[in-house]
């Protein structure tokens, strides 16, 4: 989920453990809104669709599919795959509660065990840019292999992330000069041409990939809670991990995160203490 680049074991006492439950609270409605925006770039789901919710996590893309087909008499099948069993546990609970036409399977996105040409649609929501070791190309190869001819794959990445610069600003303000910043690799994924290149290297033809941008609104929790979750989840993911000084500087870092979040484009404070952040996504639709 938060893919640390360091094997440093130290963690500040204030840090909240990066569990799937924390991830669900942190992203709030963001992943589902991203999935809805991405699904809106493909034709309506047809009867008989066989869908791979690849890297499904707690089920954002499947929820978007369920909403899209609600009220329609369709025979649709979803195979949801992820390597995180804790996330799959949450997925299965949601699937049962909401009666999704889905099966959740523990499976590595770089080594899918499905037969060739299984799916009519592959949804890869917030997957490629979360992977360690730049393994996105291997994922796309598996997506291409398991798609039926004429099938479509949806990939996305963030063009604009309003909560990343506040994290990096907090790191600059509270750590020694020259300390590596968290998530500097996110910049490459902001470029549509980088996403395009990964998809092409995975086997899709250039003229069969269309990339559009979509605004995605995210409703966060109360600001103090959100800033603490955000710093806990991302602050220690740089190549040097957490520093011992992060513990004593925790409150300063949180204050910087809050100040910078309020300056971001599209920020709104909502009734009840919640906040609205504006993200922008690159959404790629690739046809086999």
Image (cartoon, rainbow, N blue to C red):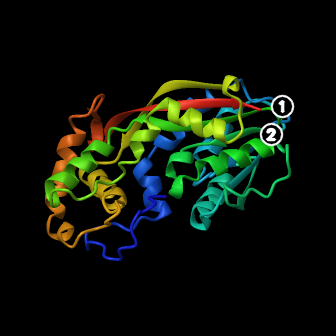
Q: How many marks?
A: 2
Label 2: how many residues lie within 10 Å, few (<14), some (14-19) or many (20+)? some
**Residue in the picture at 42% in, 53% down:** 25
First-in-chain label (1 vs 2): 1
> Which residue, given by chain and number where applicable, does mark 1 sit on?
47
Tell me the SS state at disc 2: loop
Label 1: how many residues lie within 10 Å, few (<14), some (14-19) or many (20+)? few
**Residue in the picture at 85% in, 43% down:** 117
Tell me the SS state at disc 1: loop
Q: Is residue 149 above or below residue 237?
A: above
Residue 286 at x, y percent in the picture: 68, 31
Residue 120 visible to the viewer = yes
**Residue in the picture at 15% in, 64% down:** 249
274 sits to left or right of 135: left
Q: Is residue 64 above or below residue 116?
A: above
Residue 98 visible to the viewer = no
Residue 68 at x, y percent in the picture: 67, 31
150 sits to left or right of 257: right
Q: Residue furthest bottom?
A: 9
> Which residue, given by chain and number where applicable, does mark 2 sit on?
76
Residue 99 at x, y percent in the picture: 71, 48
95 sits to left or right of 248: right
- Looking at the image, do the residues carrying marks 1 and 2 touch, with CB atoms under 8 Å apart? yes
Please state, as top left, top right, bottom left or bottom right, where the C terminus lies in the image.
Answer: top right
Q: Nearer the viewer, residue 37 or 117?
A: 117
Q: Is residue 218 above or below residue 242?
A: above
236 sits to left or right of 191: left
Q: Nearer the viewer, residue 142 or 165?
A: 142
**Residue in the picture at 20% in, 70% down:** 247
Residue 91 quadrant: bottom right
Residue 125 at x, y percent in the picture: 58, 43
Query: Marks 1 and 2, Cα distance to the nearest angstrom?
Result: 6 Å
């Amino acid at each position: 989920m938060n893919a640390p680049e360091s094997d440093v074991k130290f963690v500040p006492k204030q840090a909240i453990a990066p569990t799937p439950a924390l991830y669900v609270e942190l992203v709030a409605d963001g992943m589902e809104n991203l999935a809805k925006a991405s699904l809106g770039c493909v034709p309506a789901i047809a009867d008989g669709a066989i869908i791979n919710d690849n890297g499904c996590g707690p089920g954002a893309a499947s929820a978007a599919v369920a909403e899209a087909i609600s009220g329609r008499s369709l025979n649709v099948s979803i195979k949801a795959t992820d390597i995180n069993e804790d996330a799959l546990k949450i997925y299965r609970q949601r699937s049962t509660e909401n009666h999704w036409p889905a099966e959740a399977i523990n499976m590595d996105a770089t080594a899918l065990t499905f037969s060739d040409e299984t799916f009519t649609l592959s949804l890869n929501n917030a997957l490629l840019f979360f992977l360690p070791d730049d393994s996105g190309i291997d994922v796309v190869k598996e997506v291409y292999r398991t798609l039926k001819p004429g099938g479509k794959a949806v990939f996305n990445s963030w063009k604009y992330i309003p909560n990343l610069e506040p994290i990096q600003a907090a790191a600059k303000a509270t750590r020694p000069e020259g300390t590596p910043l968290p998530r500097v690799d996110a910049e490459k994924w902001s470029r549509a041409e980088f996403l395009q290149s990964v998809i092409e290297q995975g086997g899709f033809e250039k003229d069969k990939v269309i990339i559009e941008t979509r605004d995605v609104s995210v409703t966060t929790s109360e600001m103090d809670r959100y800033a603490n979750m955000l710093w806990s989840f991302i602050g220690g993911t740089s190549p040097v991990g957490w520093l011992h000084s992060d513990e004593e500087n925790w409150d300063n870092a949180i204050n910087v995160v809050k100040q910078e979040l309020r300056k971001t484009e599209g920020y709104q404070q909502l009734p009840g203490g919640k906040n609205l952040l504006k993200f922008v996504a690159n959404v790629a639709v690739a046809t086999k």
